[in-house]
Image (tube, helix red, strand yellow):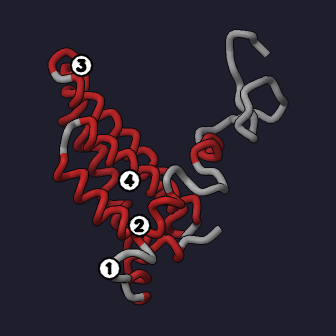
Amino acid sequence: MNGSVNQVNKQGIVGGTTSLYTTFSDLNLIIVMAEPAVLEPELAPIFTSKAPFQLPDNIKEIIVKVAPYVSVILLPLSVLAIVLGGGVAILSGFFLNIRASISLLIIVAALVIGILAIPGLFKRTRESWTKLYLAQLLYLLSSIVSFDVFGFIISFLIGLFMLFQIREKYTN
């Protein structure tokens, strides 16, 4: 092992081992772990048991069936919009508006995580739900960075409510 290059094994431990990540998809194991995601235990009751209403099971089922197809259409279009319109903004924005540039970079990270979730959405895996949840948290962070209070409130209330309502449909 080269002393200047850190390598990560399947357990996410930095060091030299014989079982190293070789593909980008293997890195997903670091992003999504078996334990609850950040703030998930704290937010779950707010959007499930303490929520003023629950979505009916048939509506949850429709959302879970349609979500992968909506993601397949909207996420790549979002990436295209960022590449065409936002790419230049990122480069020039670091000199003009650092908050907008950081916010856009956070959105790009959220989009990448969302795209990585698409295959698991069709299989209804817990891992794919966790990726969507992490992407939603990144969108919230982007709203905070850009001081978009309205966007934060809408994303927090509607986005997280919908995610936690359908969480039970995604299992390992």
Tell me the CA gap for discs 4 and 2: 9 Å
Q: Which percent across, then down, holds residue 41?
A: 53, 60
Q: Which percent across, then down, holds residue 57?
A: 43, 88
Residue at x 37%, y 46% (from the top left corner): 111
Mark 4 and mark 2 residues within 8 Å of each other at the beta carbon: yes
Q: Earlier in the sequence, mark 4 or mark 2?
A: 4
Identify which residue, 21 or 155, lies in the foreground: 155
Residue at x 79%, y 16% (from the top left corner): 1
Q: Which percent across, then down, holds residue 128?
A: 53, 60
Q: Which percent across, then down, holds residue 46?
A: 41, 68
Residue assigned mark 4: 136
Task: Give amino acid for label 4.
Answer: Gln
Name the image quarter holding residue 146: top left
Task: Residue 52: give its label.
Answer: 1
Looking at the image, is mark 4 or mark 1 nearer the viewer? 1
Residue assigned mark 3: 94
Residue assigned mark 2: 163
Q: Alpha-carbon neighbours of circle 3 within 10 Å: few (<14), some, or many (≥20)?
A: few
Tell me the CA gap for discs 1 and 3: 43 Å
